[in-house]
Image: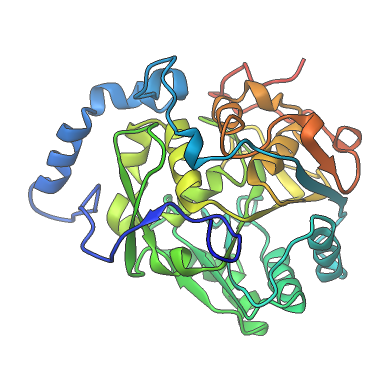
Amino acid sequence: MTPDGRPARGHEHEQGDPPDHGRARDHGPADPSRRRFLRAAGIGIAIGSAASVGLRLGGVIGPDEPAWDRGDFPEPGTARVAVLPASSYGDGLESLVLDGLRAIGADVGGARVMLKPNLVEYDPTRPVNTDPRLVAATALALRRLGAVSVTVGEAPGHRRDLHYVATRSGLLEALGEIHVPFVDFNTEPVRRVELQTRYTPLEQLWLPASVVEADVVVSMPKLKTHHWADVTLSLKNCFGFLPGRVYGWPKNVLHWVGIQNSILEIATAVRPDYAIVDGIVAMEGDGPIRGSAVDAGVVVFGDDPVATDTIGATLMGFDPERIDYLAEAGRFLGQVDRSKIDDAGEPPDRLAQVFERAPTASTEGRSG
């Protein structure tokens, strides 16, 4: 914990030169530091395709060996999550966000806030990204609640040219109108953070300095299915904190050690304080990019990202405790037990739908 009671973002070390994990090269031989990393980690392409499936195949720990120390992670307590109906991205979004943040008791007074939307790819025909209008409304609401600064940042793994995606999606225009800065995590100075969990061989992560230095971090994903992780919500959204100049595009180092394992490592290192899920127009089917739009008509707010994702999965018709990484996160990182999640908004089960599952996703996460 920090002196003001906020969760610490892993064990930060001095700024330095990061290893060259997956850094893209246009010419020349494969980077030797990358080869050394892969040998040390004991992973390779032969097992990478299997490891990406999930915890059972990608784990680097024994089935009975904990991957974390209880002394570093207090028992998850009661969480607050508010599901608020929202029919469109029109007028009233700022008031809606204010209501949601107040419902979960969000405290951002005097804080430097880093807001991380899900910005993956520009496709005008599909709801791939967190809607810029909701991102802008959230920035305004955070200011009204006393934040001294709000910054929006991202480092998508799918497209290398972040400026293209941020411009074509309308995000830069929306932020420019309210004078909110946008940072490219791919090019920012980085800080080394030692991992407190042992789900991968990585041992440390390199995070953008602006994320490590933020007082409050808000993960703001899109409500979507995912072809490898069943669902992509606030925990999976943490992939976008890691810079491509260290981890490559599409961050294959993290895929090779297991998607769900990496979700746990990254989310634990970043430790988002709050989560806001854009489910006004969501995505089902072949997410996170090629799925179909579904009018879910909700925005989800939570003071615990694990609990928020639990409710988000429920809204899509998934059983959260049968999604491997989410169930595991509920053991130490946050609350997955519905009886310990206070509904500060509408009852989630009343607004839940049955989303079409991604074609290559596990069948185990589906409710029923």
Q: Is residue 25 visible?
A: yes
Q: Quadrant of residue 138?
A: bottom right
Residue at image coords 36%, 22%: 61
Q: Quadrant of residue 110?
A: bottom right
Q: Quadrant of residue 159?
A: bottom left
Give the percent coordinates (x, y) of residue 349: 87, 32
Residue at image coords 62%, 56%: 273
Residue 368 lies, with reference to residue 341, above or below; the image says above
Give the percent coordinates (x, y) of residue 12: 37, 58
Give the percent coordinates (x, y) of residue 354: 78, 28
Residue at image coords 44%, 15%: 64
The quarter of the picture where the C terminus appears is: top right
Relative to 346, 243 lies left or right: left
Residue 199 lies, with reference to residue 179, above or below; the image says above
Residue 226 lies, with reference to residue 302, above or below; the image says above
Residue 322 lies, with reference to residue 154, above or below; the image says above
Residue at image coords 79%, 55%: 104
Q: Is residue 31 visible?
A: no
Residue 83 versus residue 52: which sits nearer the camera?
83
Give the percent coordinates (x, y) of residue 57: 40, 19
Residue 30 versus residue 57: which sits nearer the camera?
57
- Label count reads 0
Residue 272 versus residue 23: which sits nearer the camera?
272
- In the rendered view, how is the structure colored? rainbow
